[in-house]
Amino acid sequence: MTSQALSPARSRLNASYRNLTLWTLQGWIAMFFIAAGYAKVTEPMTNLVELMRWPAFAPENLVRGLGVAEIVLAVLVLAPLVSWKQGRPLLVVAAAGLLALEVIMLALHALGLEFGLAATNLALIAITAPVLWMRAREVR
């Protein structure tokens, strides 16, 4: 078995594909969490309780604060659009925060027997983890 080195052109092409894929995933993450956060901030608590069970057991300020946090973290995922040098570390911190939030919400939804919402969190984890891992490698 021989190891084959990539040509510089092929290496740049692979990096370009990887970057495009990561930006696509970052866009999906941002869209989802801006929408979810906006719903938590603006919807009446009765609607949120009908959509998800957990807001019935949480103070309204916690639910609203979580919505604001989701929006802020989602915007920070797109921070490299403004400045790549200063935005990348913000992106990594935001992705780590969203990943932690997704894992906590996965457990909360699974314990509450909300399997559709738990599956949504699994999909979000599958999207956010590669973004965090690959972008964190670029920061170093």
Image (cartoon, rainbow, N blue to C red):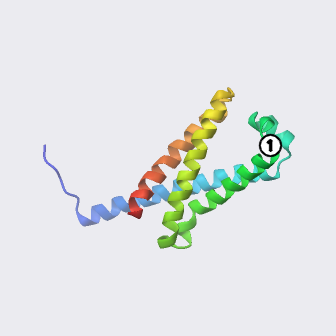
| Residue nearest the viewer, comparing 87 with 78 | 87
Q: Is residue 107 left or right of residue 16?
A: right
The residue at 54%/63% (across/down) is 90
Mark 1 neighbour class, 10 Å CA radius: few under 14, some 14 to 19, many 20 or more:
few
Tag count:
1
x and y percentages locating residue 43 in the rendered image: 83, 48
Q: Nearer the viewer, residue 51 or 10?
A: 51
* Picture residue at 56% right of the left edge, 37% below the top: 122
Relative height, residue 121 to residue 5 (above, below) = above
Residue that label 1 marks: 59
Element at badge 1? loop
Viewer-closest of 51 and 67: 67
Residue 31, position in %: x, y?
64, 54
Look at 76% across and 47% down and name the residue there. Answer: 62
**Residue at (56%, 46%) from the top-left corner?**
100
Which part of the image, by quadrant, shows the C terminus?
A: bottom left
